[in-house]
Every structure is written in C-alpha cells, then in structure tokens.
Image: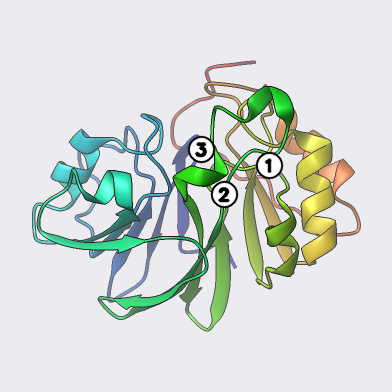
C-alpha cells in the first residue's frame, strides 16, 4: 500500500503513479524531485509550509491546496480549504478533517480556531489519511481510511501512546508514524509506535533524509 509513497522528512510525503505526482507538506525535498501536479499544505508552520519547495515543485503549474491563512499567501491555481469539506482538484478527490491540539499545554501551537487541516486522499482505489499536526481530537474518531499517517513525536503533536489510541479507534488497514526524529521525538519512536498500536498493523518507513535526532 506504500509502494508509491516517499517520506522525505517530518510530515513531508509524495505519491507518484504513472499519471501524477502529489505532495503533502513538502519540506526540504531533493532538488531533483519531480514537479507536482497537486501540493497540499496542512498548516502554516515552517516545517509544513515551505514556500521555496512549493515554488520549485510547482514550476510547471501545480494546483495548490491550503487552509485560508496559507492560501492567501500563494498565487496561481489555489484552492482554499477548511475542515469537513470534500474537494476534487486536478482529478484528486479528498476530504479535509480537523487538526488541532487538545492538551492544555499545547493549545497555542495548533489552535482549533485556526481551522487547519488533515487530508484523506483517494488514491489508487484506497484512502490515505495525512493527519498534519494534531492531537487526538474527538472529531478524528469518525475518520475511515485504509492508511493513516499520524504524528508520534509528541510536544507539538500526539506522542506514541496518543497516536496509538487514535489508530486503534479508527482502525485503518495500516498505520504509518511520522513527525518524529527531526524536530521532536527520537528515531526510535516509529518502532515504539508499532508496539503500542497493536493490533493495528504498522509500517515504519525510512525517510529520504537521515534522522536528526537519535
């Protein structure tokens, strides 16, 4: 289910098939990364919204998707989104979901009022949830997806136990940890998540860029 997916670092991913290339939160992608057909941004923080990457990857006219505060800074083919919407952009169908902090000590990082998002993408006959930066918000219990990419690094987002609880609640066919080993968390968080998320199957991907945090 991940054959077409590349993890660059943090929450930066691409999906490639014979017809299109899709990026979610591209950040520090390689200079020779293929141009995008669609770029989706979850929120305004620098490790998710990197304008240099967006400009380079969209040089051939990609469609851009972003929440309002990011979309208003972009130009070209831009679709503004908010939680709980359904869209089709350049042939890509997707739903937007909530992404915000619920822990008292983290509320200022990703406030619910910002209306930042995660995405559930319809790809190759399956559904792929890219959570963005979030805690286990109550709205997320309603997500149904085949694959769930969830942050596990803690501090700014869910940690391993909280992320495991989310995937156990929504029951994807496969869960993939992200957002660890670079800015927050450690390289071992992926393996810890695999253990904690049982019986949900987990695949720990290897990022293109080596982990920064042991």
Which one is earlier in the sequence, the residue at label 2 or at label 1? 2
Query: For the point 8% across and 59% down, which residue is it?
Result: 60
- Asked if disc 2 and disc 3 are in contact, CB closer than 8 Å, the reply is no
Q: Secondary structure at mark 1?
A: loop
Crowdedness of circle 3 by 10 Å Cα count: few (<14), some, many (20+)?
some
Is 92 drawn above or below residue 196 in the view shown?
A: below
The residue pinned by badge 1 equals: 135
The residue pinned by badge 3 equals: 207
Instruction: Return the mark for residue 164.
Output: none
Query: For the point 30% across and 81% down, which residue is it?
Result: 91
Residue 180 relative to residue 124: left or right: right
Crowdedness of circle 1 by 10 Å Cα count: few (<14), some, many (20+)?
many
Q: Secondary structure at mark 3?
A: loop
Which one is earlier in the sequence, the residue at label 2 or at label 3? 2
- Mark 2 to mark 1 CA distance (whole Å): 7 Å
Image quadrant containing the C terminus: top right
Q: Nearer the viewer, residue 168 or 177?
A: 168
On the image, the x and y values in percent for residue 26 come to 34, 43
The residue pinned by badge 2 equals: 99
Q: Nearer the viewer, residue 154 or 83?
A: 83
On the image, the x and y values in percent for residue 11 come to 49, 41
Residue 121 relative to residue 32: left or right: right
Quarter of the view holding residue 46: top left
Is 203 drawn above or below residue 124 in the view shown?
A: above
Residue 180 relative to residue 70: left or right: right
Residue 157 relative to residue 208: left or right: right
- Mark 1 to mark 3 CA distance (whole Å): 23 Å
């Amino acid at each position: 289910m991940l054959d077409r997916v590349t993890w660059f670092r943090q929450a930066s991913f691409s999906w490639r098939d014979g017809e299109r290339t899709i990026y979610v939160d591209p950040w520090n992608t390689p200079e020779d990364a293929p141009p995008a057909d669609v770029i989706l941004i979850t929120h305004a923080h620098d490790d998710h919204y990197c304008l240099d990457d967006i400009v380079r990857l969209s040089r051939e006219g990609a469609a851009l998707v972003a929440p309002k505060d990011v979309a208003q800074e972009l130009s070209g083919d831009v679709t503004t989104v908010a939680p709980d919407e359904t869209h089709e952009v350049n042939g890509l169908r997707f739903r937007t979901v909530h992404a915000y902090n619920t822990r008292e000590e983290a509320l200022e990082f990703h406030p619910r009022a910002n209306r930042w998002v995660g995405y559930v993408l319809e790809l190759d006959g399956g559904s792929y949830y890219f959570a963005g930066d979030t805690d286990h918000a109550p709205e997320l219990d309603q997500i149904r997806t085949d694959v769930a990419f969830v942050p596990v690094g803690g501090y700014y987002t869910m940690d391993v136990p909280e992320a495991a609880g989310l995937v156990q609640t929504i029951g994807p066919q496969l869960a993939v940890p992200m957002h660890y080993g670079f800015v927050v968390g450690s390289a071992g968080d992926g393996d810890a998540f695999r253990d904690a998320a049982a019986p949900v199957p987990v695949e720990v991907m290897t990022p293109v860029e080596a982990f920064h945090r042991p």
